Image: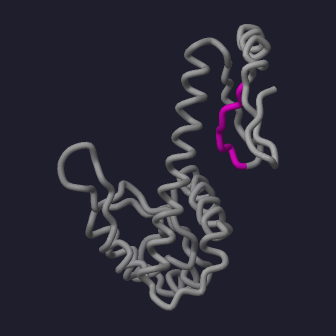
Amino acid sequence: MFLPLMAHLRVGRDTGRPRTRPEAVRADKAYSSRAIRGHLRSRGIKAAIPEPDDQKGHRKRGGSRGGRPVGLDAADYRNRNVIERRFCHTKQWRGLATRYDKHAVIYRAAVLIHAAISWITERGLYRTLQRLENSGFLISTQVEAHRTGASRKTFTVTDTGKRFLSEISGRLITLTETGPSRR
């Protein structure tokens, strides 16, 4: 399943042909096989895939002919949770969770629609937060999670932002069950 997926990989750019070779592949132990590692090595792709215990045992029993241990960048592998969260988010989307499509093409189309919707909404949120930060309404601080070391931004509303929100609160439109209404 992995090799056909890599064959269909196309990441668009601003100009030129789409990229077909990622810098690295992060995967769990289920994707640790000679075929997958050989394919990635032949294409010059870095593999952040841990080696399962049974493969370690087979390699060690081979002695000096068993081969080198697999190199694993632990810091890079830690970022795999971003992908896992995206899969979880996609699978929980109502448009996919309740689908029983007979054709893979239709299911794939639903996945692509969800990807486009989530990309647009997240990019829009990111740009809005960036604009608010640039205008002085928000202050962002970088915070690291104590267990995983993953970093994220937290935002705090500045005094200027609070004054602005209090000035415009009378002009905001709120959505109610009967429809939009003015405050």
Q: Is residue 72 left or right of residue 67?
A: right
Foreground residue, 137 or 150?
137
The percent coordinates of residue 69 (x first, y second) are 48, 70
> Would residue 35 be found to the left or right of residue 130 on screen?
left
| Region rendered in magenta | 148-155
Q: Residue furthest bottom?
A: 102
Residue at position x 75%, y 44% in the image: 179
Q: Residue 90 at x, y = what percent? A: 60, 65
Does 103 appear above or below 53? Answer: below
Residue closer to the observer: 43 or 156:
156
What residue lies at 33% left-to-right and 75% top-to-bottom?
Answer: 38
Q: Quadrant of residue 173?
A: top right
Q: How many marks?
A: 0
Magenta residues: mostly which secondary structure? strand
Residue 138 location (% of width, % of height):
67, 19
Q: What residue sits 73% from the left and 20% below the top?
A: 171
For the residue pair 71 and 147, the one nearer the viewer reads as 147
In this rendering, the answer to whether 173 lies above or below 91 is above
Q: Is 102 on the left or on the right of 151, as rendered?
A: left
Residue 22 to residue 133: above or below: below
Residue 3 screen position, x and y as percent: 36, 79
Quarter residue 160 falls in: top right
